[in-house]
Image: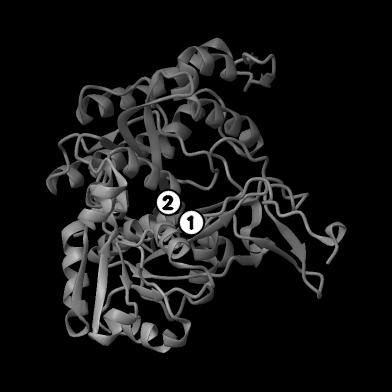
Amino acid sequence: MSHSDTVNARLPRGFVDRGREELAASERMLSVIRHTFELYGFEALETPFIEYTDALGKFLPDQDRPNAGVFSFQDDDGQWLSLRYDLTAPLARFFAEHFDSLPKPYRSFRTGWVFRNEKPGPGRFRQFMQCDADTVGAASVSADAEIAMMAADTLERVGIPRGDYVFKINNRKVLDGVLETIGLGGEDRASQRLTVLRAIDKLDRLGSGGVALLLGDGRTDESGDFTRGAGLSREAANRVLEFTAALGSDAAATLANLSRVVQGSARGEEGVAELEEIAMLTAASGYGDGRIVIDPSVVRGLEYYTGPVYEAELTFTVADENGRPVRFGSVAGGGRYDGLVGRFRTEPVPATGFSIGVSRLVSALQLVKSPLVTGAHTPGPVVVLVLDRAETARYQALAGRLRQAGIRAETYLGTSGMKAQMKYADRRNSPCVLIQGSDERTRNEVQVKDLIEGAKAAESIATNAEWKAARPAQFSVPESDLVSAVQSVLARHFE
């Protein structure tokens, strides 16, 4: 192939490759999460990456352009298909399709990739993994309380210490009640309500002053870009801001503040009553110690939430791009979406659940040095060096013996000499290599070279003569003792 015929190897914008260490860390974390969900009686479910576009429905960013916000294409029969935007809409489709055979309530968890056809940016990817848990068919807010408690248990089990996270709960009915009291009820005000929701969602980033501008005529940011506001009067905007500032010193104080804000709205008062019940249920199970709090600042952006909404926030600080300390922030969120499954059926079907951002939670665990993601207990394979190609079968038998004992092992398959093979073993993160030349073969022995111990010794050995004299961390064992010798090396360095 000529140079002009070669293809430029490049990754599409907004996508990333993931290596061994990241994959291993994610899988260890997900294993703990799945086990926690199973303890609560949730069962695994997997749905396809692709759904009919109309199954995602009005929750697409732009109904008139199916390929805006989602990756879509037409099938050979003219049907529009889309890569799933989240894991919730596919669950709604699955539950509706198998309604008669599924237990109700139906508890499930799903882990998988979701796709957004949006402009990528720092930390914003077009493909990312979510891990969701949902209860479909339970109208009682005891299901929401259970989700909150399970989320708290999950964060602690993966290595986020108590005190470094908070699970915050609000209720969209309370916000709807506030909006009713300022004249934003009804279908004809849906667009304006959505603008208000998006403004409130920026409270952490912009503060009450910035949100006040977005509730009014609009806001110009530092770059000069103007964002149109919700057009509320100052009195109406203040009512919304009073709602966001209703957080009190404890649940009782917060609920009292919210009751005042929604006074006169039956829907708002219903939302406050639901929050009171959730606070009572979680406290009765021992979670009233600050892990789970009622917090009016939580506003999930999607329109389909109908009741309690929640967000898991990590409270420890990290440095931003300017070196200033900021909270790590949200790693999971969700809420009640009683109308979503009902799109597929004539009767209403209640549902609630939450979603974990897998990559973001892995990043958080790295910052708190959780042993789940340190990688200290995932060595690479033991490499059997090939010094005589005519004896390849014997070398492969040595590797096979290790594998039968449950030890990762491989025979070197390249064509390079010993020095290059040692370099290869380093790149494979190998804990040790096996060396068998003709002398060892005659004696039915094998040399075990502990690469980790050797690297430590190399730091303290000054000269080449000392190195040769010490032969650090290299020892000979009979072939019959090979497995136990390698096991002792692994035990020395790994759990």
Between 407 and 159, the one lying in front of the other is 407
Q: For the residues marked 1 and 2, what is the alpha-carbon distance in whole angstroms?
A: 15 Å
User: Mark 1 or mark 2: which is in front?
Assistant: 1
280 with respect to 173 (left or right): left
Between 147 and 449, the one lying in front of the other is 449
* Tag 2 secondary structure: helix
Can residue 353 be seen in this snapshot? Answer: yes
* Tag 1 secondary structure: loop
Counting from the top left corner in percent of width and height, residue 65 is at 77, 50
Q: Neighbour class for label 1 at 10 Å: few (<14), some, many (≥20)?
A: few
Q: Is residue 313 above or below residue 350?
A: above
Residue at point 47%, 39% (across, down): 300
Q: Neighbour class for label 2 at 10 Å: few (<14), some, many (≥20)?
A: many
Counting from the top left corner in percent of width and height, residue 19 is at 48, 56
User: What residue does disc 1 label?
Assistant: 19
Q: Amino acid at mark 1?
A: Gly
Residue at point 36%, 38% (across, down): 271
Q: Which quadrant: the N terminus?
A: bottom right
Q: Amino acid at mark 2?
A: Val
- Disc 1 and disc 2 in contact, CB within 8 angstroms: no
User: What residue does disc 2 label?
Assistant: 358
On the image, which quarter does residue 283 sit in? top left
Q: Which quadrant: the C terminus?
A: bottom left
Residue at point 62%, 29% (across, down): 192
